[in-house]
Image: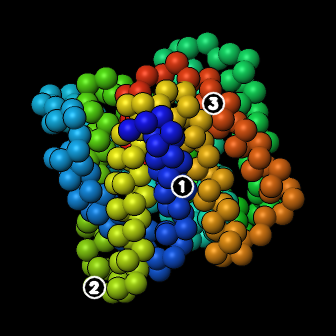
Amino acid sequence: MTPRTALGALHIGALMFGLTGVFGKLAAASPAVIVFGRAAFAVLVLAFFVRFASQNGWQKLQALDYRRLALSGVLLAGHWVSFFISVKVAGVAIATLGFASFPAFTVILEGLIFRERIRANEILLVVLVSIGLILVTPAFDLGSGATVGLLWSVLSGLLFSLLSLTNRASSGRIPAVQAALCQNVVVALCLLPVAAPQLNAVRALDWLWIALLGVFCTGVAHSLFVASLAVIKARTAAVVFAMEPVYGITVAWLLFNENPTPKMLIGGALIIVAIVVSARMSGHADRKTVAAEAASH
């Protein structure tokens, strides 16, 4: 893979990640069924990638690895469920922008958990995200679907941040695709008891959207991301990954006529700037760390 094709693969992967909310809205199934189906289809793709395309093979895991993967799988399940609830309640744009608050949560949690000093540029990141979320919210009314949906998406961002920190702790030992495969197995097992009674009522068209979500927005997207990291610098990959909200909101605007207000556009721009700043701040991160974070979404 050349640098040009790797960069193209990165953007295709980011576009697929960005379509997550779109396919979630197209599927009329419940968030539990969507997440279960997404994880199940993703397991198939990732297992194929590990078997035939991965150069790392299968890493033998220790008891600590299994505990971390189980925890990260539960966090991933919560992250996805809360995100798709937000999509159903408030639409793709608000759900995507609310989730994009995760860099601010990561800065705060790293400071609290690892007792690291928060730098001035990290404080600026938190401020940008906070102002962006205030502007994105049409009105602070708990009876409003937009407000409730935004709160669900912010919860999704918080869980994603916790998941990212968990992944980073084990990213040096476990190959990213193997970790993603194990996490998706845990997600499917977590959602199976809730989703199983509803599976017979899922329409064929909804299974198509869920399959596209699991195969392309999870399995293929992550595989492209990991493959491109063999050529592309981690910093470049992180910045391209930050384009995900732009792709998702643009497609939702075209398909669902979710016309953002000027205030919402300004808030979204602030949040996206914060994501890019966060990506550049973490540019020293190695490829395994970036791949582990990509595997979470």
Rendered residue at 29%/63% (across/down): 41
Residue topped by disc 1:
15
Disc 3 residue type (three-letter): Ser
How far apart are labels 2 and 1 at the CA level? Answer: 31 Å
Q: Nearer the viewer, mark 1 or mark 3?
A: 1
Q: Nearer the viewer, mark 2 or mark 3?
A: 3
Judge the density around disc 1: few (<14), some (14-19), many (≥20) Cα neighbours within 10 Å: many
Q: Nearer the viewer, residue 278 or 254?
A: 254
SS class of the residue under badge 3?
Answer: helix
Q: Nearer the viewer, mark 2 or mark 1?
A: 1
Q: Earlier in the sequence, mark 2 or mark 3?
A: 2
- The x, y position of residue 292, in whole percent, is 39, 35
- The x, y position of residue 217, in whole percent, is 43, 58
How far apart are labels 1 and 3 at the CA level? Answer: 19 Å
Rendered residue at 49%/27% (across/down): 233
Rendered residue at 24%/49% (across/down): 49
Judge the density around disc 3: few (<14), some (14-19), many (≥20) Cα neighbours within 10 Å: many
Residue topped by disc 3:
278
Q: Earlier in the sequence, mark 2 or mark 1?
A: 1
Q: Is residue 98 above or below residue 30?
A: above
Disc 2 residue type (three-letter): Asn
Q: Seen in the image, is 231 located left or right of residue 248?
A: left
- The x, y position of residue 242, in whole percent, is 60, 42
